[in-house]
């Protein structure tokens, strides 16, 4: 069909590159470090099956339509849970979303007109770039280092460009695994009070910590109530059930609710009740501890395997999350490496598409949660061969 028949905002918009790549890497004999998938054996399938039976039998009203804001007991539970990261919220402040992805879409829908500016890290979460393009926003980039974004640079951008929104993944970032330091969180919290802007603190990975100490959320350091915190049960229970949440300043949350009414009415009641019951029974924390043990071993294994590859590759050294990020020497094109790697039945994601401005063709993202430790070792043996042939 002729592109001009589509809405202008959708014309020439490519699909999410990773979703396309995943089709290729889902061949059964490929060892994939490409997707951001939790390990399938981490899903609490048996217990969720039991809970599903219980809630449908004992509380059939969850099969009815629910409120757009979400299942009240889960909203109450979330408001209490986030105290651990320093956020003080009431159940009324919590909107249950269909994954934290939906939170990003709803806040963009609520705030952005075409041409409005959004500040982003670069590289950043690919789907956030896609959402920004859908709402025809423009962007400014805030740079950073191994301790996260430079807050003074952000301060200057806010003064100069007056953006409406800042999108950050401050803990175990996707794709780099980098975490914003405590000092910079506090600095950011103070700095925000000099500006009018909404910050999205997207945090689907914060509880996946394998070493080091937990940090307060940026929202906990925010002195001007301008931070919207997005959480998710995707990486700590299951991504397929699609349950996340947003805790945002009341006027912003209200507009997100109105946007959600038109999008999906509400997040699946059954999914919300499953998550709530799982949490209420005290199963979440031991489950997270189990996952962290498993993923911590996998991260350690992958880091040990890095020595099989050329020494001039720079790697991030995250304390949690799902990803390692590689920067190859300038002359190496990750896309060429990817093609050669897929022939050897191993895959990763070339990094270019995580950069809102493009370029950076010598970078790549490696996921360590989905492959077994044995396959991580075998995958890196294969990658070493690819490098030696190149
Ligand atoms: C930074 C970031 N935000 C949001 C999401 C979406 O997560 P959910 O499954 O909660 O929608 C992901 C998933 O990979 C992510 O990496």
Image: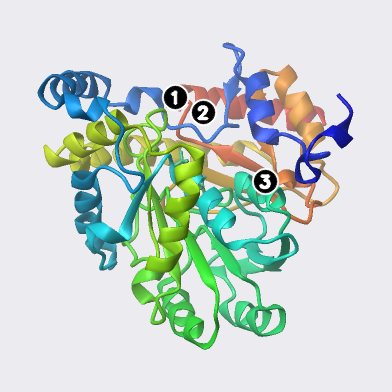
- Pointer 3: what residue? 130
| Image height of 43 relative to 236, above or below | above
Task: Give the number of the mark in front: 1 or 3.
Answer: 3
Residue located 72% across and 50% down the image:
133
Residue that appears at 40% across and 34% down: 242
Please determine whether, in this image, residue 75 is positioned above or below residue 276: below
- The answer to whether marks 2 and 1 mark residues whose Cβ atoms lie closer than 8 Å is yes
Q: Is residue 121 left or right of residue 357?
A: left
Counting from the top left corner in percent of width and height, residue 296 is at 37, 41
In front: label 3 or label 2: 3
Whether residue 126 can be seen here: yes
The residue located at (63%, 25%) in the rendering is: 22
Residue lying at 66% horizontally and 85% vertically, measured from the top left: 159
Query: Looking at the figure, which quarter contains the N terminus?
Result: top right
Q: Is mark 3 within 8 Å of ligand 1?
A: no
Q: Are marks 3 and 2 in contact (CB under 8 Å)?
A: no
Residue 145 located left or right of residue 94: right
Q: Which residue is mark 1?
A: 372
Q: Are marks 1 and 3 in contact (CB under 8 Å)?
A: no
CA separation in Å, label 1 and label 3: 31 Å
């Amino acid at each position: 069909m002729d592109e001009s028949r589509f809405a202008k905002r959708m014309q020439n918009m490519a699909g999410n590159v990773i979703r396309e790549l995943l089709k290729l890497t889902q061949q059964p004999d490929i060892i994939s470090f490409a997707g951001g998938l939790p390990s399938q054996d981490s899903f609490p399938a048996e217990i969720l099956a039991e809970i599903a039976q219980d809630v449908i039998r004992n509380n059939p009203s969850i099969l009815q339509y629910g409120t757009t804001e979400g299942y009240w007991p889960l909203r109450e539970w979330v408001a209490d849970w986030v105290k651990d990261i320093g956020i003080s919220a009431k159940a009324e402040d919590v909107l249950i979303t269909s994954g934290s992805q939906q939170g990003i879409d709803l806040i963009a829908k609520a705030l952005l007109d075409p041409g409005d500016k959004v500040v982003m890290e670069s590289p950043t979460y690919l789907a956030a770039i896609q959402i920004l393009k859908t709402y025809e926003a423009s962007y400014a980039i805030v740079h950073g280092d191994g301790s996260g974004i430079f807050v003074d640079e952000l301060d200057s951008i806010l003064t100069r460009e007056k953006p409406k929104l800042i999108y950050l993944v401050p803990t175990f970032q996707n794709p780099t695994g980098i975490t914003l330091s405590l000092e910079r969180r506090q600095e950011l919290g103070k700095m925000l009070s000099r500006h009018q802007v909404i910050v999205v603190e997207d945090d689907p990975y914060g509880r996946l910590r394998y070493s080091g100490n937990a940090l307060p959320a940026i929202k906990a350091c925010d002195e001007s109530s301008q931070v919207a915190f997005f959480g998710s049960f995707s990486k700590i229970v299951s991504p397929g059930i699609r349950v996340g949440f947003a805790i945002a300043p009341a006027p912003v949350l209200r507009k997100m609710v109105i946007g959600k009414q038109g999008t999906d009415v509400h997040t699946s009641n059954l999914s919300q009740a499953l998550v709530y019951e799982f949490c209420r029974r005290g199963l979440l924390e031991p489950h997270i501890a189990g996952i962290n043990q498993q993923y911590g071993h996998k991260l350690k294994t992958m880091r040990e395997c890095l020595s099989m590859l050329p020494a001039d590759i720079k790697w991030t050294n995250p304390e949690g999350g799902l990803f390692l990020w590689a920067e190859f020497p300038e002359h190496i094109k990750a896309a060429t490496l990817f093609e050669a790697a897929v022939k050897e039945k191993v895959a990763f994601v070339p990094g270019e598409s995580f950069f809102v401005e493009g370029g950076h063709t010598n970078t790549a993202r490696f996921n360590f949660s989905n492959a077994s430790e044995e396959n991580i070792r075998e995958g890196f043996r294969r990658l070493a061969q690819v490098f030696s042939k190149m």
